[in-house]
Image: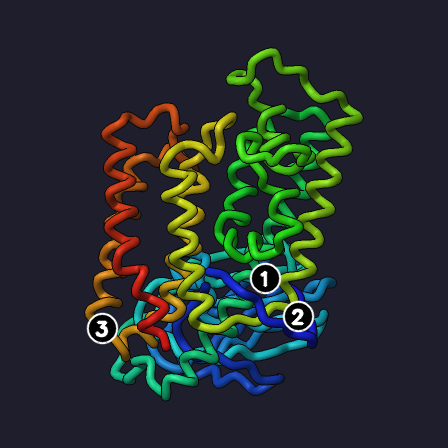
Amino acid sequence: MRRTPLPVTLGLVALSVGVLAGCTENRPVDSDDDRSLQVTSTADACEVSSGEAPAGNLRFSVRNEGTDVTEFYLLASDGLRIIGEIENIGPGLTRDLVVTAPEGKYVTACKPGMKGEGIRDDFAVTASDEDVAVSGDTQALVDQANKNYAAYVQDQSAQLLDQTTEFVALYKAGKDAEARALYPVARQHWERIETVAESFGDLDPKMDAREADLEPGQRWTGWHLIEKDLWPARAQDYTALTPAERTTYADDLLANTQTLDDRVQDLTYTVDQIANGSRGLLDEVATGKVTGEEEYWSRTDLWDFQANVDGARVAFEGVQPIVEKNDEALATEIADRFDALQALLDTHKQGDGFVTYDQLTTEHVKALSDAVNALSEPLSKLAAATV
């Protein structure tokens, strides 16, 4: 992902992460230290000298033996929350990522070319005698949460751009089956940072407007117009877009996605924005996804549902150490209700995705709605517990 030196402040949002991280330049790796790991990044591999290390201060010494600039990430087990990252590692260079990690499951990732989801592998941190509880004053936790959330948004935006580029190419080429398969997958990156994207009032209606919500005289563009063209079965007297129209609308979507990606490079965040963004993403679930209104044509609402929950949970977990200092009972309640909602969502999984919305019964929808409402109540108190 990119960084620019001109931060601006955003008015709302959603987050990432948990423990304190930093980077150093070209420090020697102690081969006798189990917490010192060597990483070799190439165009098609991300080799870590060990798949596990004892809990404590870990040092990943990352050498780029590829031809493109690369990045390295230590991610939480969900593959979304960024525990630590180091970027802009040029060919032939070695840079170090130092991160404090408690016992648990993680994911390592190299990103040759600094795009896409990267080359990933599982990584385990085992128990040790070292005290690795998150410590430090509240301001240090705040600063780290803000930094990691910015990295999370940039990462999701970069993956959205990458997959939208692929989706647009398939759609323009008339490869409809492949485009339909990629549609809900690509849109998950939008949904995870939807409150950030919506803060750009000029971009959101161009990219994500639903036909039912159009204002008089508003020109319809974006994801859902293309969705209708790919899944016209529910439309009455629908006339398919011509190849020229497909190109026009697809190119417009891609151009707006590029603009979004450019803009998020300059954003900074505060913990109250992150906390309110978490609640905002859950509101998106309640008002659109659980009702089946968002993906009216494709019926892929549960992909969006999961992505909104992903973003909301990443936001919460990023500020969780702060909330635990201020209101431990609230932090526990929110975590438990996220678990309950995820367990319910998991019952509707099918392969790498979900069943379509039309396969849900009234009882299924009510159970999902009840779980969302149960989480919404304590989540509404999150912002107050971070300040």
Query: Residue 301, labelled with which disc?
Result: none
Query: What residue do we see at 54% from left, 35% from top?
Result: 213
Real-space Cα separation, disc 3 to disc 2, in angstroms: 34 Å
Residue 152 in the figure: left or right of residue 282: right
Q: Earlier in the sequence, mark 1 or mark 3?
A: 1
Query: Residue 328, labelled with which disc?
Result: 3
Q: Earlier in the sequence, mark 1 or mark 2?
A: 2
Outermost residue to the right: 244
Outermost residue to the front: 216
Task: Check disc 3: other Cα within 10 Å, few if <14, some if 14-19, many if 20+.
Answer: some
* SS type, badge 2: loop
Residue 314 x/y as whole percent: 41, 60
Quarter of the image with the C terminus is: bottom left
Task: Check disc 1: other Cα within 10 Å, few if <14, some if 14-19, many if 20+.
Answer: many
Query: What residue do we see at 27% from left, 53% from top?
Result: 375
* SS type, badge 3: helix
Vertical placement of 195 versus 94: above or below?
above
Mark 1 in CB contact with mark 2 (< 8 angstroms): yes
Residue 180 x/y as whole percent: 57, 29
**Viewer-nearest residue: 346 or 366:** 366
Q: Amino acid at mark 2?
A: Arg
Q: Amino acid at mark 1?
A: Gln
Real-space Cα separation, disc 1 to disc 2, in angstroms: 9 Å
Query: What residue do we see at 58% from left, 39% from top?
Result: 209
Quarter of the image with the N terminus is: bottom right
**Residue position marked by numbered label 2 in the rendering:** 3
Q: Is residue 367 visible?
A: yes
Real-space Cα separation, disc 1 to disc 3, in angstroms: 30 Å
Vertical placement of 215 versus 40: above or below?
above
**Residue position marked by numbered label 1 in the rendering:** 154
Residue 348 x/y as whole percent: 32, 34
